[in-house]
Amino acid sequence: MDQMIPSKFSPYRFFSAEEWATFRAGQPLTLTLDEVKRLRTMGDPVDLDEVARIYLAVSRLLYAHVEATQLLFRQRQKFLGSETAKTPFIIGIAGSVAVGKSTTARILKELLARWPSSPKVDLVTTDGFLFPNAVLEAEGLMQRKGFPESYDVGAILRFLSDIKAGVRHVEAPVYSHFVYDVVAGRTLSVDQPDILIFEGLNVLQVRDLPKDGKVIPFVSDFFDYSIYIDAEEEDINRWYVERFMRLRETAFRERDSFFHRYSKIGEAEALEIAEGLWADINGRNLYENILPTRPRADLILRKGAEHRIEQVALRKL
């Protein structure tokens, strides 16, 4: 059974964008058009209307979950007779390359931080937890970059474990898309946020369960809520290629860019390379590793061909 087809057996309730917009329920629009333009990634046409239709209701929903989690935490403290400090509410955001995860994460970060309670909200991406290119080259994994095996999963689990434990100044590695590598010696310090948004391709993935029943933690075990950004594969493919071709005329022209060589070739050859990168790497990763995790999300935001969210699937309680 396809869980994404509305039926009484699906674990999700489905809403059109127009239906979902009504759940905003007076939530104020705290972002300006200039701010949205700054937050969106190349090729993502999100605007104030999209924020009002989709993201304000998502923000309101998340606020309800944060409040409920905090209440449960206080009740558990009372039950245990404990006085430990509250831990951050962690939101995982998953989805394919070029589908708009980064834009969603950035917009939600800004909206959540502007709640009346002014919570501290941090955003970390899994890109920094990729093994450095030198390691990937040595292990023959450069053509598998972005696949699960190209990440230092142990480092991710240690990072999230420290965050949930309330450790001060937890360091996350930083990635540069310009040089296409982890930046040596550069880190981002995360210091006891109220909310942490953790965004990446494979954050909802699980592994085979051990036959002996021993505990094997998954990244998503640390999430309080999860969101999957969805779209048809042919649309994501097109968005990826269009972005590649635009970058060829912009960032790739910078001499220090990892992809500088692509700015020196003809348009037809560049287009062929972009399609090949999708078919051989990103498309395969989508079908083998990313898309299978979609049913694990609490909320699925599905985009149409114009890169705008047309359907929202909310997991039933």
Image (cartoon, helix red, strand yellow):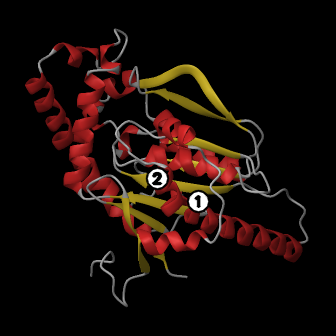
Residue 158 left/right relative to 105: right
Q: Where is residue 307 in the image (x, y as percent from the top left)?
A: 33, 52
Q: Is residue 268 above or below residue 307?
A: above
Instruction: Give yes or no for contact between labels 1 and 2 (Cβ–Cβ under 8 Å).
Output: yes
Along the line of sight, the residue nearer the viewer: 172 or 305: 305
The CA span between labels 1 and 2 is 10 Å
Which residue is depicted at the point 16% across and 43% down? 279
Q: In this view, does 77 lie above or below 126?
A: below
Q: Is residue 273 above or below residue 207?
A: above
Q: Position of residue 287 (x, y in %)?
A: 25, 56
Q: Name the residue under label 1.
A: 223
Q: Which amino acid does label 1 sit on?
A: Phe
Which residue is depicted at the point 30% across and 58% down? 231
Q: Where is residue 294 in the image (x, y as percent from the top left)?
A: 38, 64
Note whether residue 297 is visible: no
Which residue is depicted at the point 41% across and 51% down? 202
Along the line of sight, the residue nearer the viewer: 62 or 2: 62
Q: Between disc 1 and disc 2, whose residue precedes?
A: 2
Residue 174 left/right relative to 71: left
Quadrant of the image containing the C terminus: bottom right
- Which residue is most to the bottom? 8
Q: Where is residue 252 in the image (x, y as percent from the top left)?
A: 31, 19
Q: Mark 2 points at which residue?
A: 203
Q: Which amino acid does label 2 sit on?
A: Val
Residue 118 left/right relative to 262: right
Tag 1: Cα neighbours inside 10 Å, few (<14), some, or many (≥20)? many
Which residue is depicted at the point 29% across and 30% down? 142
